[in-house]
Image (cartoon, rainbow, N blue to C red):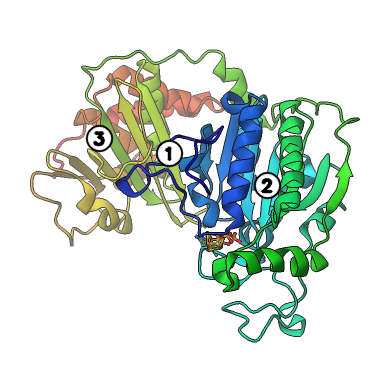
Amino acid sequence: MSTIEQKGMYKVFPRSGKNVSFTHYCPGCGHGIINKLIAEACAELGLQDRTIYVDPVGCGVFTYYYWDAAHISAAHGRASAAATGASRARPDAVTIAYQGDGDLGAIGFNNAFQAASRGEKFACIFVNNSLYGMTGGQMAPTTLDGEKTTTTPFGRDPALTGYPLHVCEVFNQLRAPVYIARVSVADTRRIMQAKQAIRKVFEIQRDGKGYAILEILSPCPTNFKMTPDKAAKFCAEEMEKEFPLGVFRDNSASAERPVVRPIPQCATCAELFAEKTVIPAAVDDPDFAEKRFKFAGYGGQGVLSLGLTVAEAARLEGRHTLWFPSYGPEQRGGSANCSVVVSGTAIGSPTVEHPDVLVCMNQPAYERFVGDVPKGGIIIVDETVPINVQPPEGVKLVRWPAIRMAEEFGVPKAANTMMLAALKKFDCTGLKGENLESALVASFKKKPELGEKNRELLRKAEGRENVS
Ligand SMILES: Cc1ncc(C[n+]2csc(CCOP(=O)(O)OP(=O)(O)O)c2C)c(N)n1
Ligand code: SF4
C-alpha cells in the first residue's frame, strides 16, 4: 500500500508507539488493497460519521489504526455477533464486519451464518485468502484441494480434511440476505469490480436494506510462499476455479427497509423496560469516595442478590453504580460472585480487581479473593470459614456468624441478609442505612411479607455483639 494519503483513512497510523504512514501488511497482500477500497467507498459516500467497523482477529486486526470511523474489536470469529449488537443498538449506523476465512469460515461460521439467516442489518466483508494468514498459514475451511499449507504440507486431501467451504453458495440458501457476491483483488480489472461491489454493500447499509455479504478472494504471498505477482496469479487462476466470481443474489433494488425490531417482551425485560421510566439519573458528587465491592460464595447463597441490593441502595441514593455478576457453570452449588462499584462520578469499568470491601460466604471464595484486598480494605467472612490464609497487612478481617444467625432465626436462606447487616453495622458501604433497608425490602417485591421479615432480621442481626 502506498504512503499517499487516502480518503477515509487516518493520515498516520500510530502503531507500536510510532507514527507511520504504511500498514503492517506484507507486500502484495490483498488486505492492503481491500482496506484502501473500503476506506475510499466509505469516504466517497460520505458515510464516515455513520460507519462502525467491526474488526476481526486475523491479519485484518489493525484496521482500527487505518480506517477513520468508529471501531469495535471483536474476538476471533465473533465479528458478526458484535456487528449484530452494534447494528441493533445503532440501527442508523452503517455497520461493517470485516472477517477472514478462518475467522468466518471456521471458528465463527455459526454466528455469521445465523446473523445472515436473521437478516441482521450489517454488511460482512469476507476476505478469503484460503488459509490462516496471521498464525502462519494453516489450513482453513476454504483451502483448495491439494493446496499446501503448514498443516497440509502434502496438499489438502479431501479424504482427510473435507472439501473447500463455499461460503457465498451456502449463505445463498438463506432467505434473509439482500446481497451476496464474490469478487477478487488479484489484478486491476478485478480490483475495479471489487470497488463497485464494496460501494454497493455500503449503499445497502446506508439505505438500511438488510444483510449483505461480499466475499473477496485475496492473495497472501507470504503463506502461499510466492512472490506477489505469482500469488496474484494463483488467486486469479486457482482460487477462482474453486470459487467462481459473480453476484449470487441482489435484491437491493426491491428490498424494503427491514422492520424495526421490537423490544424483547419476556417477563424480566418487560419489567426492566417498564421500570426504566422511573429510574432517576445519578447525581455527580466528586466528594463521594468510590467504593468497590466483591461478594462471593456458592450459587444459592444469595451473593448475587446481596450485591444487587447494595447497588440498588446506591441507586436510591442517586449514586452512580454498576453490578456485574459472574456465574460458575452450575445453577446451584457452583461458585458465584459479583462486583459492585458505587461512585460519585461516572464509572469507567464494572470489573473489580481490588475490592475495598470483600464479603465471602465460603472458604474457596475467601481464598480466591483475600489477596486482592488493598490496605485499608475490609473483609467480612462467614465464621464457618477457616482462616488458613491471612489477609494482607492493613486489611481488617471480620468473622461474622451469617449462616448461624440465619439458622437461629429460622430462615436459613437469609444468610445474605445477615451479611447485609454486617455491612450496615460496620458502615462499609458509605450508603445510608435507610437506603440499604429499602433496597432489601424492594428485592422481595414479589413477596412483600418476606421483605418486611428480612428488614426485621437485618435489624436483629445488626444489634449482634461479640463478633470476632
Ligand atoms: C479464540 C481464538 N482462537 C484462535 C486464535 C488464533 N488465531 C488468530 S488469527 C487466526 C486465524 C486467522 O485467519 P483468517 O481469519 O483467515 O484471517 P487472515 O489472517 O488470513 O486474514 C487464528 C486461528 C485466536 N486469536 N482466538
Ligand atoms: S500473512 Fe498473508 S494475509 Fe497476512 S499480511 Fe501477510 S500476506 Fe497478508
Whether residue 192 is visible, yes or no, is yes
Q: Is residue 3 left or right of residue 462?
A: right
Q: Residue at x 51, y 33 (%)?
A: 68
Q: Residue 125, labelled with which disc?
A: 2
Mark 1 closeness class: few <14, some 14–19, many ≥20 residues within 10 Å: some
Residue type beneath disc 3: Ala
Tag nearer the camera, 3 or 1 = 1
Counting residues from the start of the chain, the first of labels 3 and 1 encountered is 1
Q: CA distance from mark 3 to mark 1?
A: 21 Å
Frontmost residue, 463 versus 98: 98
For this orientation, the residue located farthest to the bottom is 154
Q: Which residue is mark 3?
A: 422
Q: Residues within 10 Å of mark 3 (few under 14, many from 20)?
A: many
> Is any atom of residue 461 visible in this view?
no
Please state the horizontal and vertical placement of residue 47, each as a whole percent of the image: 63, 26
Q: Is residue 38 left or right of residue 464?
A: right
Q: Secondary structure at mark 1?
A: strand
Q: Secondary structure at mark 2?
A: strand
